[in-house]
Image: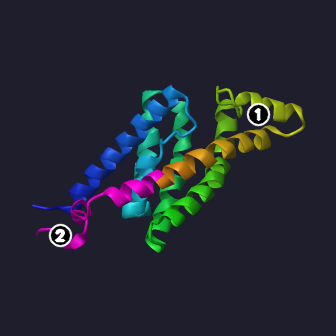
Amino acid sequence: MKNRKVYLTAFCGVAVAMNIVLGIITSALGIPLYLDTLGTVLTAALFGPVPGVIVGALSNIITGLIYSVSDIPFCLVNMAVGLIVGLVGKKFKWTFVSALITGLVLSFVCPAIGTPIGIFVYGGLNGSFSDVLVMSLVQSGHDIFQASFLRNVASNLIDKIGTCIIAWALIRAIPMQFLANFKKNNESA
C-alpha cells in the first residue's frame, strides 16, 4: 500500500539525518564544503518549500540540542535555504543552471541572516582560522558585521553553490520509479 505522506515523512527524516551527519563529517575534516544543508536542498527541490523549511529547522534544532543550544538560532538560515530552494523548485525546473544561480543567491542570503545571529551569539567569530581574516578586517577599519559578513560570503560561495550542484546531480540520479512513490495519484485509499 503506497502512501505519499509516509514516503515524504521518511524522506524528510533521512534528509534531516543527512544534514546532521554530513555537517559533523565535514566539520571534523575541516573542509569548506559543509554540506549541512544538502538534505534541505534535496527535500525542497523535490517537494517544495514547506518540507524544505521543516527539514532545515529540525536539522539545526536537533544538532543544537545534541551539541550546543546556542546554535539553534541558526535554524533560520537552514529554513531560508528550504524556502528559497523550494520556491525555485516550484517555479522552475531544477536544472544545473537553476541550481548554480540558486547557490549563488544563497551565498549572500545565508550570510545576511546568519551574520547577525553569529555576532549576537558568538561575537562574530566562529573559532576557525578564518577569524584571523575577520580580526584583520576589523583592525583595518571595517565593523564586525562587515568583516564577518565578507568571511561568511566567501565560505558560502563554495558551500552553497557546491551543495546545490551536488543536489542537482543526485536528483538526476534518482530513479523515476522511486519518485513515483511521492506522487499524489499513487495514493491508495
Residue 87 in the figure: left or right of residue 46: right
| Numbered disc 1: secondary structure | helix
**Magenta includes 175?**
yes
Structural distance between the alpha carbons of marks 1 and 2: 53 Å
Q: Which residue is mark 2?
A: 186
Range of magenta residues? 166-189
Amino acid on which the number 2 mark rests in the picture = Asn
The dot on residue 121 is none
Give percent across and percent down for residue 94.
45, 66
Q: Return the disc, 1 or 2, that comes first in the chain's sequence.
A: 1
Find out whether residue 174 is within the magenta segment: yes
Position of 40 compared to 1: left or right? right
> Mark 1 near mark 2, Cβ–Cβ under 8 Å?
no
Q: Which residue is mark 1?
A: 134
Q: Please state which of residues 30 and 72 is positioned toward the viewer in this rendering.
A: 30
Q: 29 or 44, which lies in front? A: 29
Expressed as whole percent of the image width and height from the top left, the position of residue 9 reads 27, 53
